[in-house]
Image: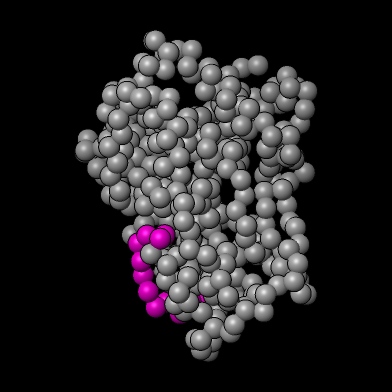
């Protein structure tokens, strides 16, 4: 079994398609397809559901993700000069707000336990600003949404895909995402953020009209306003949420989900790339093992259907909820 094949498999799991993974590992899509066939033959099991286009991970493929992550981690450790103690130093890391209160605390705890000599200095900002600071040498690496525009001179490594969902007050009526967005005022994720632009594209592609009443630039601020009944919003469903999340209703849109991709970026051949790779390994391991978060995706009769990583399950009778205190748009 080739370690390159295992790394390519993880790239497919992280990016969601053979084509995107091919760009990540800088190989052709046909080469990636051949790698996966070789890996499946070596394991003696099919990892993908090829009846779908593009192919997606099947149950065996999803179960193999954490095992593959451990294999890659173990392989990488073989080449450290003096074991884990060789990882040390100072890493100036930029992080988007939604990650700094989500996945980052757990990643830092894991890193501190493994690499006590590694010190990470955190700076928070939106993706475009962090990448600019990275290019100017102010930061060594950054955790940002998928890179937009020129990637020249940058090494981009995705580690998590987060679907965009609608959030509504917890006692909102049991309606679809499309119905809720037509009923409530809309709280927009700023277009200055790359995820805000992704959300704007989703609205335009699905021809969803909104009654915009507020623009905010952090997930926590948006969630707080929604929690208190001031409207609805579209946000990424984080692989790992904050330690204390205000209760809101999460509702999936009809059709194929749109994902925000999170990744680690640093300049090519940066002297601290090894420190960034140690962080990346922990982020990938956490994202691979994170369980699904509850989410309402539809209303069927008197039952709500909740989305989980393993499919759809009926949750029982839906709460009646209260009618929103806002006027429905004309």
Residue at 27% x, 28% y: name it: 90
Residue placed furthest toward the top: 82
* Quarter of the view holding residue 8: top right
What range is drawn magenta here? 209-220
Residue drawn 63% across the image and 33% down it: 65
Is residue 205 visible in this depiction of the protein?
Answer: no
Q: Is residue 236 left or right of residue 293?
A: left
- Residue drawn at 52 percent across, 65 percent down: 247
> Who is closer to the viewer here, 321 or 127?
321
Is 120 located above or below residue 71 in the figure? below
Q: Is residue 6 magenta?
A: no
Q: Is residue 184 above or below residue 31?
A: below
**Which quarter of the figure is the N terminus placed in?**
top right
Task: Name the residue nearer the viewer: 26 or 281.
Answer: 281
The relative height of residue 226 versus residue 3 in the rendered view (above or below) is below
Instruction: Please say whether residue 219 is one of the residues in the magenta stretch.
Output: yes
Q: Position of residue 129 (x, y in %)?
A: 28, 49
């Amino acid at each position: 079994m080739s370690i390159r094949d295992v790394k390519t498999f993880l790239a497919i799991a992280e990016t969601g398609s053979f084509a995107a993974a091919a760009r990540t590992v800088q190989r052709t899509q046909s080469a990636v397809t051949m790698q996966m066939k070789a890996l499946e033959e070596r394991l003696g099991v099919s990892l993908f559901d090829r009846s779908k286009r593009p192919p997606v991970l099947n149950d065996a493929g999803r179960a193999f993700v954490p095992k593959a992550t451990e294999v890659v981690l173990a392989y990488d450790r073989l080449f450290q000069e003096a074991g884990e103690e060789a990882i040390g130093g100072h890493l100036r890391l930029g992080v988007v707000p939604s990650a700094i209160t989500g996945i980052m605390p757990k990643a830092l705890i894991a890193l501190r336990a493994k690499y006590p000599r590694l010190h990470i200095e955190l700076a928070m900002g939106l993706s475009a600003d962090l990448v600019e600071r990275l290019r100017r040498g102010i930061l060594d690496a950054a955790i940002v949404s998928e890179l937009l525009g020129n990637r020249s001179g940058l090494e981009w490594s995705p580690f998590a895909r987060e679907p965009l969902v609608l959030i509504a007050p917890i006692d909102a009526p049991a309606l679809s995402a499309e119905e809720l967005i037509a009923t409530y005022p809309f709280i927009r994720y700023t277009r200055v953020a790359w995820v805000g632009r992704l959300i704007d594209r989703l609205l335009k592609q699905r021809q969803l009209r909104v009654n915009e009443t507020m623009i905010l630039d952090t997930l926590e601020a948006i969630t707080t306003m929604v929690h208190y009944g001031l409207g609805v919003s579209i946000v990424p469903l984080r692989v790992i949420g904050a330690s204390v999340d205000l209760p809101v209703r999460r509702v999936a849109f009809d059709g194929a989900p749109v994902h925000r991709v999170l990744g680690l970026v640093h300049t090519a051949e940066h002297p601290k790339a090894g420190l960034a790779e140690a962080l990346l390994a922990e982020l990938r391991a956490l994202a691979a093992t994170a369980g699904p978060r509850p989410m309402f995706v539809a209303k069927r009769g008197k039952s709500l259907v909740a989305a989980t990583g393993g499919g759809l399950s009926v949750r029982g009778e839906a709460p009646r909820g209260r009618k929103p205190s806002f006027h429905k748009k004309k």
